[in-house]
Image: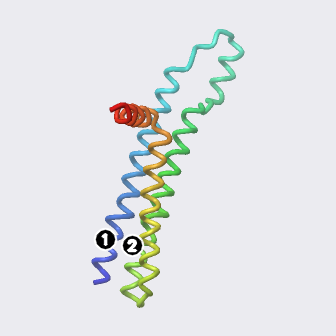
Amino acid sequence: MIGSRIYTFAMAVVLSLLVNTVFNVLIFKHVRASTRRVQPQTISANTSSRNNQHPRIRRRDISLLKQMIFMFCTFIVGWTPAYSILIIDDIITLNLIIFRYSVIVCELAMLAIAINLLICNHEIKEFLINKIRRWVRH
């Protein structure tokens, strides 16, 4: 029984974290390359030589990195305790309340991710506001 719980933990948490990390790195590299292509050309020779020495991280890149770190940490904090408690419960018997609290933490993490999506994604926010406006008019 404990072997299946460890397998479930590995598939649900560890593999998901690895896939998430790989995709986040690929997304960040793509956005970073896009930012470098879009940067305006400098006119002065002094400024261009200074810019070539230390590439600056733009506000957009920092914002994306913050979002990725928030989502990653929310996933870890939300899902790791519940699956860890399942494994620990096979070894020593735990109180049912502990498992219930870990499930509540999972649900709060999912809610935090959904709220973050609504706050930070302007297209979704605009779409939902337009839908609510149409619904109120009718």
Task: Give the structural element (helix, strand or loop) at label 2.
Answer: helix
Percent position of residue 111, x then y: 44, 56
Q: Residue at x 42, y 63 (%)?
A: 107
What residue is disc 1 on?
A: 8
Whole-Å distance between the Cαs marked 1 and 2? 8 Å
Position of residue 44 in the picture relative to residue 89 (left or right): right
Q: In this rendering, which labeled residue sits more in front, label 1 or label 2?
A: 2
Above-or-below relation of 101 to 112: below
The residue positioned farthest toward the top in the image shown: 43
- The quarter of the image holding the N terminus is bottom left
Residue 42 circle label: none
What residue is disc 2 on?
A: 83
Task: Give the structural element (helix, strand or loop) at label 1.
Answer: helix
Using a 10 Å C-alpha cutoff, classify the residue at mark 2 as few (fewer than 14 neighbours), some (14 to 19) or many (20 or more): many
Precedes in sequence: disc 1 or disc 2 = 1
Which coloring applies here? rainbow
Q: Please, what is the three-letter code of the amino acid marked with disc 2? A: Tyr
Q: Residue at x 45, y 63 (%)?
A: 78
Percent position of residue 98, x then y: 46, 80
Q: Please, what is the three-letter code of the amino acid marked with disc 1? A: Thr
Percent position of residue 3, x then y: 30, 80
Question: Mark 1 and 2 residues: CB-CB less than 8 Å, in contact?
Answer: yes
